[in-house]
Amino acid sequence: MTGSGRESEGGEEEVRGARRIPGPRWAADDLDLESVPLPPLPPPGGSAPDEAVPEQSAPKPEPGPESRLDPAATEPGLEPGPEPDARAPELRPEPDLAPEPDPAAPDPAHGRPDPAAPDPAMTSAPVVLPHQVLKALLGAWALSACSVEETAAVEDHLTGCAPCADEALRLRDAVGLLHTDGSLDLDPTLRTRVLDGCFGRRPARIPVPEWAAPYDAETARLDALLRDIGDSEWHAPVRLQWFEEEHQVSRRTTVAGVIGHLTAVDGLLSAALGLDDPLDGGKAPLDPTERTETYWAATRRPPTRAVREPWRAQSHELIRTASFAGRNVAETSVSYGAFALPLQDALLDRAFECWVHGGDIADAVDYPYQAPSAAHLHRMIDLAARMLPAALAGRRSAGLAGPAKDLVTAGAPGRSLHLEIEGHGGGDWYIALDSPAAVGSPERAVAQVALDGVEFCRLVAGHISPVEAAAGQEGDREAIRDVLFAAASLSRL
């Protein structure tokens, strides 16, 4: 090194002026004063202030806190003691023995403040940290993991630094996502939204018809549920419920049995489209209940998760065939034995039953299961409302409903019931009361029933009784009762 040494002296001055973190202080009770030797006393005659005590006259005392407490150690005639051990507690002299030292005054032996003394800058002024350190603390600040001093320093910095303030807001928003209380299950509309986004960028060459979209969505949702359950849960008991005449009936089966039931009834649509029927198309009955019993009797007992793949392959084939056929196949008649539906309504009916039985399975295995999207649920409610006049006429023929009071010609407005569906998938429908060929009219409404959309679907599925479903009623009590029981009669196995 060259030079006069001023540079090094300047560096030492910077080190001396820097704040230092004091070491841990021991309690006075932790020190055994009797085990530490005291420093030797000066000779009786004393020594001159400017004379040094020879090394042979007295041995050097061992380092210890007593050298700071003994008044003789600070007398002018004695050599200063060694530097105190940083691990030993520092005991300050009593006021009557020596004046209180100034905490800010430098140590005469080393030229720096006493490490044990608190730094006035740390106790009276806030912590001053550089920009890079404060920026690195933003993540911990967003998680509320900073100390009080660091939090105060970061928040004071954010008031004057726009880039750090923006970053802090983004981090706080991200932390909010980590503490969400929402369900971990996927949104039932996620698949539809993803497909809509994909089709919006690149339309499908052969899109799924709009009238087949509810069936496509509900089979996909049920298939997602079935993928999540274990092998043992396929044997979980499931109770299927529906109404017959005036009474609610039920049938006990398993999760695998429910999928077999869906496969058997979906075979009616497969046969109408010229596809393979899981049952013998020439000999199998058309009634859904009889088809289900036939299918259950022919399958190996007990059914297992092996039924999932045939059911899903059949639903894919139905959607694919309907998509390729386009509008020409929408009006193809599908016979259910006692009645028939066009294919577009039959697929909507199958979507409704897929959702209802998906809820039955979810209840059996304790799995969350949401209602269909509002648009699909509205179409299901509309199908049930269009089937109510024929169901009401059938009950009247069987003597289960009141007689017609005002017959009109086909297509003319007749006595009507205002069915108001609230909430999810809601709307207003006017049900003709006296003739299936009559047209419901607001001007000739004699009664009104208000129901929640999901509750109305549960009534149509036979899961609740008509008495439990009536949330709001006004007008002709007999018409209200007949329509509610007609809605329950739409249910079947």
Image: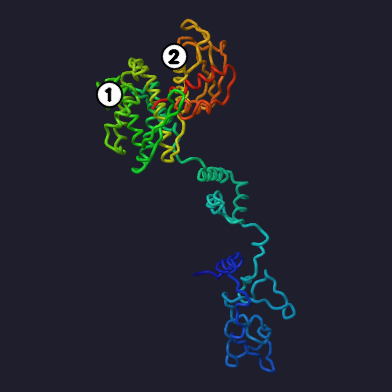
* Residue 128 in view: no
Left of 95 or right of it: where is 86?
Answer: left
Residue under the point 59% across and 46% down: 161
Residue 58's disc number:
none
Identify whether 87 is placed above or below 270. Answer: below
Above-or-below relation of 46 to 5: below
Q: Earlier in the sequence, mark 1 or mark 2?
A: 1
Q: Is residue 366 visible?
A: yes
Outermost top residue: 409
Q: Which residue is found at the position 31% from the left and 39% from the top?
A: 304
Identify the amino acid type marked 2: Ser
Residue 397 — which label?
2
Quick check: 137 above or below 274? below
Q: Residue 334 placed where, x, y %?
A: 34, 18
Q: Between marks 1 and 2, how big is the CA–CA gap? A: 29 Å
Residue beneath disc 1:
284
Q: Position of residue 8 (x, y in %)?
A: 55, 68
Query: Three-letter amino acid code at disc 1?
Result: Ala
Q: Name the quadrant containing residue 87.
A: bottom right
> Is 180 left or right of 199, judged from the image as shown?
right
> In this view of the protein, which residue sits in the foreground, 246 or 267?
246
In the structure shown, which secondary structural element does the residue marked by tag 1 occupy? loop
Q: Quadrant of the C terminus?
A: top left
